[in-house]
Image (cartoon, helix red, strand yellow):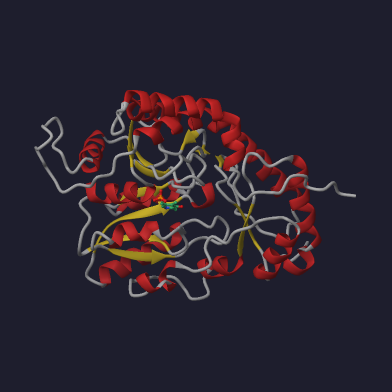
Amino acid sequence: MMSGPGDPIQFVDLAAQKARIADRIDAAVARVLDHGQYIMGPEVAALEAALAAHSGAPHVITCASGTDALLMALMAFGIGPGDAVLCPDFTYTATPESIAVLGATPVFVDVCADSFNLDPEGLSDGLALAQSLGLRPRGLIAVDLFGLPADYAAITPWAADHGLFILADAAQSYGARSAGARVGTLSSVTSTSFFPAKPLGCYGDGGALFTDDAALADAFVSIRAHGKATGGGKYDIARVGLNSRLDTLQAAILLEKLAILDEELTARRRIAARYSAELDPRYLPPKVPPHVEPAWAQYTIRCAGRDGLSATLSEHGIPTNVYYPRRLHQQTAYRDFPKTVAEDGPASRLSDEVLSLPVHPYLTEPQVDHVIAQLNALADHHGVAESG
Ligand SMILES: *Cc1c(COP(=O)(O)O)cnc(C)c1O
């Protein structure tokens, strides 16, 4: 007999994390309430320094959300009407939103069925489409979906050859590594999110940009504070900017969470390794190259008959989620933008087949046993790959 899962399984368990570091969080919050510097207090610079040390990125600029981080990067690149930016069709809404809200045109390209990430082979078609429409191709946003870094080794030389920037949307992948290098250094410009459910989350909204380019870093600092001139006075406005500072309270909370992030990532990787080794091979998770350590924001499998599978798992106390049931170009807001994706291509299959399993760091071994046993009992009906 398989042992029962014990406590109810949460999809994300912020309460367990809170219980672990409650004293430190309370003390950190109390310090901010004491000094009262709610906007750009000392914890903001301390967090930026800690993130720079942790990631290895020379410049880290925090901001109000992962969406604003994308937006600020595109603003610094001067993106606007007439410009095209390539992005995957299978990602969160915020990715193309940051392009479209500036009046530029997102061009949707397909992903790889193996990695769920941007297909480097499809980029040339996206570039050609943008040109044929009379748009100026300026760059691409690569998304590290579910915590697996995109294939920067393939994308970076291609982008350089065509004079395009790469913006790495690492909202789901902070803490991941590729060939030993951390997210934040895999691309010249990287954005991330501190939304509570992300691998490094705060207790509200937050985000950050990482770059090796000092001029861009200056631009980010200016843009997040209404376009204030670098080194200028408060009322010396050099460009159109935003109000996108990270709250001091969130920075204080993130400093405590960053201190346990590596342990949490180790726990996520241990659970993911168990799923990959023990789940029926007819469920297909993304293929992880040997030199890559994902952040495992999600552990996502491809399955058949997804609604039935998730309902049965739910009856057995196993919560699941679907990221994402629709491709971006199928959304009302994005259906008129150009795309190179085939109707029955990889993004289409993924949107029909993906199911994300609990993989948070506070799952117990019996809970993981239970998830594996239930899924394996259903593999004859819900596996997607041929067996053998
Ligand atoms: C969460 C997410 C964002 C946006 O982050 P917010 O902090 O919620 O604004 C952007 N891109 C991707 C891929 C995400 O998952």
In this rendering, would 129 be left or right of 362?
Answer: left
In this rendering, would 307 be left or right of 30?
Answer: right
In this rendering, would 383 be left or right of 161?
Answer: right
Relative to the observer, which residue lies in front, 5 or 375?
Answer: 5
Question: Residue 291 location, x and y as percent?
Answer: 56, 39
Q: Going by the picture, which residue comes out furthest to the left?
A: 236
In the depicted structure, whether residue 170 falls above or below residue 95: above
Relative to the observer, which residue lies in front, 234 or 358?
Answer: 234
Relative to the observer, which residue lies in front, 36 or 381?
Answer: 36
In this rendering, would 204 be left or right of 320?
Answer: left
When asked about the image quadrant of residue 122, the answer is bottom left
Question: Residue 113 location, x and y as percent?
Answer: 56, 62
Q: In percent of the image, x 41 and y 52: which residue is there?
A: 142
Dividing the image into 4 quarters, which one contains the C terminus? bottom right
In the depicted structure, whether residue 249 falls above or below residue 282: above
Question: Residue 311 location, x and y as percent?
Answer: 69, 66
When asked about the image quadrant of residue 351, the answer is bottom right
Residue 384: tell me if it is visible: no
Q: In percent of the image, x 75 and y 40: which residue is there?
A: 365
Relative to the observer, which residue lies in front, 25 or 67?
Answer: 25
Q: Going by the picture, which residue comes out furthest to the right?
A: 1
Q: In percent of the image, x 47 and y 35: which residue is there?
A: 182
Question: Residue 270 location, x and y as percent?
Answer: 67, 39
Number of on-image labels:
0
Q: In percent of the image, x 32 and y 34: which residue is there?
A: 212
Residue 364: tell me if it is visible: yes
